[in-house]
Image (spheres, rainbow, N blue to C red):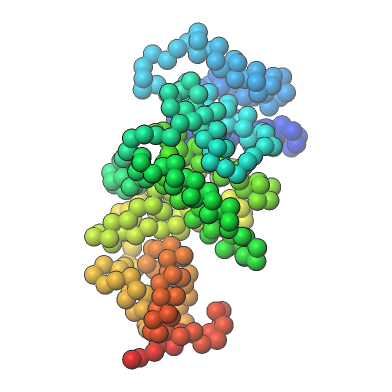
Amino acid sequence: MENFDEYLRQGEPNKAEKAKVWKTAIGLQQVDGLKPSEYLIETAKQNIEGDITIEEVKKRIDSYYQQHPTKTAEDRTEEADKVSARIAEMLSEQTFTFSPAEYLSIHRRLFTGIYKFAGKIRDYNITKKEWVLNGETVLYASADSLKATLEYDFEQEKKFSYKGLSEQEIIEHIAHFISYLWQIHIFGEGNTRTTAIFLIKYLRKLGFKEVNNDLFAENSWYFRNALVRANYEDLSKGIHKTEKFLLRFLSNLLLKETHSLKNREIHVLADTVNDTVKPQNDTVNDTVFSLIKQNNKITANEISERLKMSLSTIRRKIKELRDNGKIERIGSDKTGHWKIIEK
């Protein structure tokens, strides 16, 4: 990515903006382990300099691969180059519609001529071995329910109101939505890149104009692994779904926080070397209750960190304990404490 840093240092607004777009476009190829060619890099620089348009970039890339076709199916450089150029084009556009049709359109524009199913909902079930899961797979949505599930998630998000929410609550909700959207895995391939472009454009619509897209340029694999961990659980091994890694990424992205983004920390085996309390034989409710009994001033955030579970799940479990009359909150959320109600 250092190929474009010179433009950022020079400080010319137009060139710097284009350089950021290209860094994001190329960085996102890392989610599938792809690397663009030097030809693409040099052509992108000509676009940044203003010598050629993005449309000319795309034409040159197409012409290049007509003359220099890839020799093996394993060589996906052509895909990396073409998709990078298309992402750069889309991120330069000030257009967006929040709808399933837009989501499908992004995939179609990215992968036309690369995948036969570009922009089409898959009609078969899939599994994918994940490094971060030690070879296991996320359970993706069934092919029979994809369209209905996609439409439902969009409809629920349209109804949701962000009014009155704190920045942290907004980020948590966005994490839920984008995690659910990705888990559907509506396409055979290209889901993460499509989801990333959709997320960037949606954040702009929500008013996040200064999104730090360098995170996608430099940590796109972390973004994918965070989505994987947000949608995987194996209770027999004490592994629970957790959005904490996705929240770290989004907090850095939107609030310019500086959480460490290390892929090895997301790996499921990292949980086994962490000397924290984990729910194994007991139910999650019992474990949360036990932690509150041990420390009546413990917060939901602290419980979330201890149990390696999402904050939304912990809040739901605390609400269940309150509704069941097992605990009562005395005082405010910040300075109060929990009262254990013995029956």
What is the quadrant of residue 87 in the picture? top right
- The answer, for residue 302, to whether it is visible in the render is no
Q: Residue at x 66, y 47 (%)?
A: 205
Q: Residue at x 37, y 75 (%)?
A: 288
Q: Residue at x 44, y 75 (%)?
A: 319
User: How many numbered tags mark residues here?
Assistant: 0
Residue 85 placement, left or right of 69: right
Instruction: Using the image as rendered, state which of residue 209 and residue 98 is in the foreground.
Output: 98
- The answer, for residue 299, to whether it is visible in the render is yes
Residue 244 to residue 281: above or below? above
Name the quarter where the N terminus is drawn.
top right
Instruction: Using the image as rendered, state which of residue 308 and residue 148 is in the foreground.
Output: 148
Q: For the view shown, which residue lies furthest in the top direction? A: 67
Q: Residue at x 46, y 65 (%)?
A: 311
Residue 294 placement, left or right of 336: left
Residue 53 position in % (x across, y down):
69, 21
Residue 59 placement, left or right of 53: left
Residue 253 placement, left or right of 242: right
Name the quarter where the C terminus is drawn.
bottom left
Residue 91 position in % (x across, y down):
63, 35
Q: For the view shown, which residue lies furthest in the bottom direction? A: 343
Instruction: Using the image as rendered, state which of residue 103 and residue 165 is in the foreground.
Output: 103
Residue 126 position in % (x across, y down):
32, 38
Residue 255 position in % (x across, y down):
62, 56
Residue 22 to residue 181: above or below? above
Residue 42 to residue 188: above or below? above
Residue 301 to residue 206: above or below? below
